[in-house]
Image: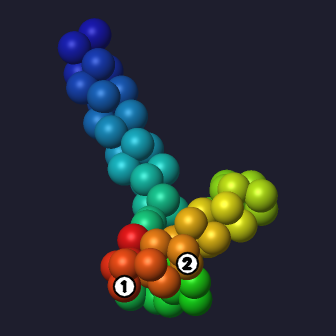
Amino acid sequence: MLPHRGLRLSVCVLLLLLATLPVLADDISKIAPTSYVTDVAGVVPASTRQRLEALCTELEQKTGAQL
């Protein structure tokens, strides 16, 4: 029985490693910001994005600082 347990464990580990291959992160050097808010994943609602853009623009105009 013991050899089967080791074989099962080896197969499970191999499958786990193979399953993680397609899960590679995006290359961060390819991200080119075009405005204050860069939402590559597309999870920020348009209204929130517009509000953030307005706040960041106002901040830069008033203080010269960027966020």
Mark 1: amino acid: Gly
- Name the quadrant of the C terminus: bottom left
59 w.r.t. 32: above or below: above
Q: Count the marks: how many?
A: 2
Look at the numbered disc 1 and give the secondary structure of its residue.
loop
21 over 8 or under it: above or below: below
Residue that numbered label 2 is attached to: 57
Point out which mark residue 64 bears.
1
Q: Quadrant of the N terminus?
A: top left
Q: Is residue 28 left or right of residue 36?
A: left
Note whether residue 37 is visible. Answer: no
Q: Which colour scheme is used?
A: rainbow
| Residue 8 seen in the current view | yes
Name which residue lies at 24% across and 26% down.
Answer: 6
Q: Nearer the viewer, residue 28 or 21?
A: 28
Instruction: Give how far across and how far down residue 40 sits, in percent.
Output: 60, 70
Residue nearest the viewer, comparing 66 with 61? 61
SS class of the residue under badge 2? Answer: helix
Pointer 1 local density, CA inside 10 Å: few below 14, some 14–19, many at least 20: few
Residue at 43% over, 53% down: 20
Residue 47: give x, y in percent of width and height: 77, 58
